[in-house]
Image (cartoon, rainbow, N blue to C red):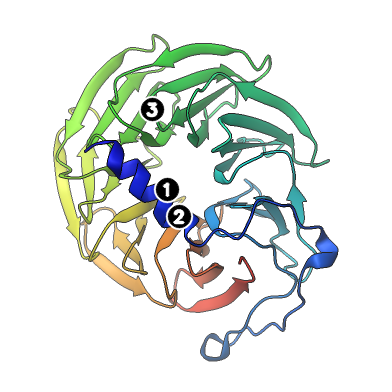
Amino acid sequence: MNKMFFIILSMFLLAGYSGSHALSPVEQDRLPISSDPSQVQQLATLGRGIPNEVAYSPDGTILAVASSVGVWIYDAQNLNAVPHLLEGHTALVWDVVFSPDGSLLASASWDRRVRLWDVETGESIAILKGHIFEVLVVAFSPDGSLLASGSSNGTIRLWDVASGEAIAVLEGHTYGTLAIAFSPDGSLLASAGMDESVRLWDVASGEQIAILEGHTDGAWDVAFSPDGAILASSGADGTVRLWDVASGEPIALLTGHKDWVFDAASSPDGSLLVSAGLDGTVRLWDLATGRQIAVLEGHSDWVRAVAFSPDGALLASGSNDKTVRLWDVATGEQIAILEGHN
């Protein structure tokens, strides 16, 4: 891996970037709704900008989309409602995550800033400065007291949410940190990097405690199982790998994607793993056996992001085809398209 990886990635993403200006709700289109999977149409009133990440609020009422023009906030229970754009970042937003209690939203941007937003008011309440390169990922600790952020130069910063102060800088990745995740008990932080490694950190001390090696190209994402026993990682080598957290040993290799696997997430009950890839597919896996159980097809370009709804019934996916799609997890049927992110 080398710096050319990030240069190519930047060119790849910005090829579809339509500009950095913010659009007001009145500039949105209204489109018809269809709940028939065979006749799915665009959902009404959609935000613009290529979607880079999607996140549900803990109560499932809000869907946040990190995009090339900002952060769009959707009413997940009434997608006809006009979405709201959170304005403030001066470059594309690469990641977004809700705090465990749903009161805050954190966003990571290529403007080298992390912003905290009040979900109720939509106001930017803090700007976390310190990264000297693009910020690619953010994650809240399970108790909401800490925020971790990762940058394209490989550094990870831990922030005190209440004060907005940086309390630690974790160094180990030799190239960009593409994903971070806290363990369910908050004691560990996992990170995935362009240097092909997955790393485990002790949150209390900031010490690196393990390097999980196996990916043969950049590691793109990490996700803990709800019980914290298993860590899933996805990579540019086209694989999803499962690791035993206690021992650091690999326990399964999931193959099926034809190219880079960008994102992975565990279902709330821990029974399923979802992955998203450059091949344009979303795939569901049985986490216990590693068996692929469904391939969700519909996107016409690479899929960057996936997220389960809090009850595990729905799955949202964001793609470079400028759509966010909603899927019924039980049937694998596509039930809605949010189209207009252009």
On residue 10, the disc is 1
Would you place residue 71 above or below residue 297 in this image? above
Would you place residue 225 above or below residue 304 in this image? above
CA separation, marks 3 and 1? 14 Å
In the rendered image, the quadrant that contains the N terminus is top left
Identify which amino acid the numbered label 1 is placed on: Ser
> Residue drawn 22% across and 66% down?
258
On residue 320, the disc is none
Q: How crowded is mark 3: few (under 14 residues within 10 Å), some or many (20 or more)?
A: many
Instruction: Find numbered disc 2 in the image and state the secondary structure of the residue it sits on.
Output: helix
Give the percent coordinates (x, y) of residue 131: 51, 23
Query: Which residue is labeled 2 in the image?
Result: 13
Would you place residue 235 above or below residue 244 in this image? below
Identify which amino acid the numbered label 2 is placed on: Leu
- 3 vs 1, front mark: 1
Give the percent coordinates (x, y) of residue 232: 29, 44
Q: Residues within 10 Å of mark 1 (few under 14, many from 20)?
A: few
Residues under numbered marks 1 and 2 in contact, where contact means CB atoms less than 8 Å apart: yes
Write down the quadrant of residue 175 in the picture: top left
Instruction: Find numbered disc 1 in the image and state the secondary structure of the residue it sits on.
Output: helix
CA separation, marks 2 and 3? 18 Å
On residue 153, the disc is 3
Residue 87 is at least partly visible in this image: yes
Write down the quadrant of residue 184 in the picture: top left
Instruction: Find numbered disc 3 in the image and state the secondary structure of the residue it sits on.
Output: loop
Give the percent coordinates (x, y) of residue 49: 62, 59
